[in-house]
Image (spheres, rainbow, N blue to C red):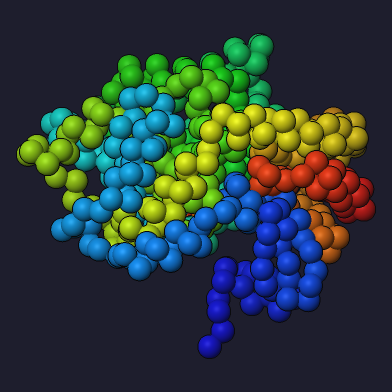
Amino acid sequence: MTTFYKWGSGTNPDAPRVDHAHDEFLITTDGERIIDAASGALVVNLGHSVPGVSELMADQSEAVAYVSTSYFRNDPAERLADRLTELTPDPLSAAFFVGSGSEANETAIKLARAYHLAQGNQRKQTVICRHGSYHGATLGALSLSGKPTRTAPFVPLLKRGPRIPAAYPYRWTYEGTPEEQAIAAARELDAAITREGPETVAAFIAEPVSGSTLGAAHPHPTYYREIRRICDRHDVCFIADEVMTGFGRTGEFFAVDHADVAPDILTVGKGISGGYAPIAAAIVTERIAETFEADSEHAFAHGHTFSANPLSTAVADHVVAQYDEDVLADVRDRGATLRSALAPLTDHPHVGEIRGLGLMYGIELVADVETQRPFDPDRRVSKRIFETCLAEGVYVYPGSGSVDGRAGDHLLLGPPFITSPESIQEIAETVIGAIESVT
Ligand code: PLP
């Protein structure tokens, strides 16, 4: 039997076979060293050598590796929940642990709908989403995603609410200052809710900094302040999907912290365990949590076999304990180093924009910088740059972006927070060389 890793790439016989990894490096079975400039898929935030994980895994699996959370409690899950309360924006107070980011978003959607139902608002079921987004591979989360390379083969998807424009200032046509444009873009949500009828809208879901689809595109912080006001006005839950951006990636613990805004539901994954265990969570405010408390008449009828698994939560608790102000300072510092190392691309005729926050950088590649015309998708520009970089020993994340149906090429860079200045320089030089040779 062969292993089918991933749609379209699983059977690639030439894909490097990773034997082991340390710090920011992957070492193949051929002994080749590859810099992991995308932390996997922006997962391995703390690098491949976090001390203490293997001992902790051995101890926890010796003690207890699995219990059904339908009938039993466990300490690691509760310790992790307490630790998350310290890091997440204030009104967030309860976590529902699941196995992946997709499950976290499925959970968030169901939580929002169950919450409104419990308030007697039977009709509040619609979830509004954005173009150029990615919320997961399961059919519910995928239906709310605006990523044609992933969604197109499965149309018709599940019924969803309207999609509003992406938070993609590079291609916005709103007038005014960045702040005024951000407000205009956010008000697309207000218009969509009004068109749908506020009594039918349960939630709005968005990635505060766009990840795999739009390569670190992000609006002026005013955008999310306005989104918060609009959601409050219409009693709509704001779900911030921080599966990729959570845990320091953008230079704050969470990307919503840049706007000083708290969502009603925050979904996290990837960096919560730094890649050491499959775990994710939907984290809700006290107001939502109270609805489903044990003595309430409302139950949240939901759960997965591996929800709040003791082994995964123990590992995540150990990893989350490492995220502190010093780590954030490192992210900002190394992010600035990466930004200056990429400076030679600023006036490149095929680089439309270099954007990012913390250690999450996107490079938008276009056929023509004046008109912002994207490359013809058949040229596979970002895929070829990815291949060229990999052959040179640097792994970057190739974008398969698309917004409102238009193709777009970008690269996403998100190295581990411990990446050395020398490796950062090597990443930038390799990327610059690859862009030169492919475009
Ligand atoms: N949400 C965002 C923003 C993501 O980037 C991803 C994965 O890349 C997901 C959700 C889905 O997470 P998972 O692949 O763990 O299901």
Q: Nearer the viewer, residue 61 or 17?
A: 61
Q: Nearer the viewer, residue 185 or 211?
A: 211
Q: Which residue lies most toward the bottom here?
A: 1
Q: Residue at x 63, y 56 (%)?
A: 48
Q: Is residue 407 left or right of residue 291?
A: right
Count of numbered badges drawn on the protein: 0
Q: Is residue 392 visible?
A: yes
Q: Nearer the viewer, residue 104 or 247?
A: 247
Q: Residue at x 23, y 57 (%)?
A: 69
Q: Is residue 365 left or right of residue 57?
A: right
Residue 179: horizontal and vertical position, in percent? 60, 13
Q: Is residue 383 visible?
A: no
Residue 236: horizontal and vertical position, in percent? 32, 27
Residue 307: horizontal and vertical position, in percent? 31, 56
Residue 238, by quadrant, is top left
Q: Is residue 409 left or right of residue 104?
A: right
Q: Residue at x 41, y 41 (%)?
A: 267
Q: Is residue 105 left or right of residue 12?
A: left
> Quick check: 15 above or below 359?
below
Residue 53: horizontal and vertical position, in percent? 51, 57
